[in-house]
Amino acid sequence: MPTALITGATAGIGAAFARRLAADGFTLVLVARDQARLTASAAELRKRYGVAVEVLPADLSLDEGVRRVEERLERGVDLLVNNAGFGHPGAFLEVPVADEVTMLRVHCEAVLRLTLAALPGMRSRGRGYVINVASVAAFFTRGTYSASKAWVVNFSESAAAEIPEPNVRVMALCPGFVRTEFHQRASMDTSGIPGFLWLSADRVVDEAMRDLARGRRVSVPSALYKAIVSVGKLVPRNLVGQVSGRLGRR
Ligand SMILES: NC(=O)c1ccc[n+]([C@@H]2O[C@H](COP(=O)([O-])OP(=O)(O)OC[C@H]3O[C@@H](n4cnc5c(N)ncnc54)[C@H](OP(=O)(O)O)[C@@H]3O)[C@@H](O)[C@H]2O)c1
């Protein structure tokens, strides 16, 4: 059975990846901080899909947490989903610098280290996949969040371009607004975001898996968000900054 390790696997997009990959017959390794929730998620997945599920509690903002996950990846996995992430409450200049650094650790340092821990085994076997969850925000300007996600897209494209083995792939996944715990955890007011902009986590994962199979290096789920990203590249950057900075604030 192929093995998939998913970070942030207990909620939202990560939980949707866990359900989809369990249904596809993957053995799972679930990573998040909340041990009780990990145990409950694993029990539910075993019961519903009959697959083996390991839990690996780890805080990816800490060196020790990333190291534990690196060690598991070095033992070999077929698919790594770097998904764990969060948003900040408040506007860019109001966020304490320590919280910004924590975000960079989870969104960038952990993604870098875990990808580099997984790739050697994948390359020696000639097969393996890494999905790095970025965001449509990567193409806009919204403080450290969008900057960190732009790094994820650029890093993933760079890694994908350098890997010589055709069946070892790295893909950045760039969802728009997805109904998960993300906005509530960040105390964001989403009441002004129209319904048609929201995607389900299951749809995002289905489109991601399809794009991975097609060999895409960047996946933007839904025609609407593909259009938004295309238009965003044509609009002057200062206008992009004014509009995107207002969305989803308290
Ligand atoms: N929802 C959206 O609209 C949206 C849009 C674009 C991109 N994204 C990206 O999608 C990814 C998943 O977000 P989501 O919306 O599914 O969020 P979510 O529902 O809040 O789930 C976040 C998951 O990450 C885990 N996590 C958070 N911090 C962690 C840490 N320091 N170490 C280990 N695990 C951690 C959480 O579990 P614990 O709290 O137990 O650790 C949880 O399992 C993120 O990278 C986010 O930036 C989300």
Image: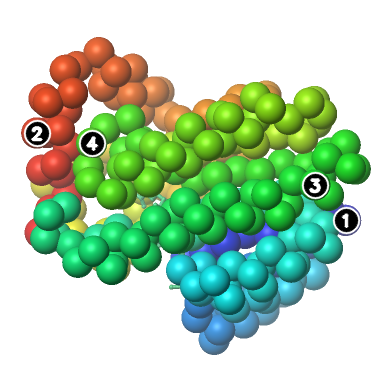
- Percent coordinates x, y for residue 214 in the rendering: 67, 24
- Tag 3: residue type? Pro
Among all residues in the image, which is located at the extreme top? Answer: 234
**Does 4 sit above or below residue 155?**
below
Report the residue marked by disc 1: 1
Location of residue 87 in the rendering, given as x and y in whole percent from the top left corner: 30, 58
Left or right of 194, for residue 109: right
Q: Which label was assigned to residue 242?
A: 2
Q: Is residue 40 above or below residue 62?
A: below
> Label 2 crowding class (10 Å Cα cut-off): few <14, some 14-19, many 20+?
few
Which of 21/23 is in front? 21
CA–CA distance in space, label 3 to label 4 = 34 Å
Amino acid identity at mark 2: Gln
N-terminal-most mark, 3 or 4? 3
Q: CA distance from mark 2 to mark 1?
A: 48 Å
Q: Residues within 10 Å of mark 4 (few under 14, many from 20)?
A: many
- Disc 1 marks a residue whose amino acid type is Met
The amino acid type found where label 4 is placed reads Thr
Label 3, label 1: how many angstroms apart (C-alpha)? 20 Å
> Circle 1: is it few (<14), some (14-19), or many (20+) Cα within 10 Å?
few
Question: Tag on residue 120?
Answer: 3
- Disc 3 or 2, which lies upstream in sequence? 3
Q: Element under label 1?
A: loop
User: Label 3 to label 2, Cα distance in Å?
Assistant: 42 Å
Q: Earlier in the sequence, mark 2 or mark 4?
A: 4
| Residue receiving disc 4 | 141
**Residue 137 appears at what percent x and percent y?**
31, 38
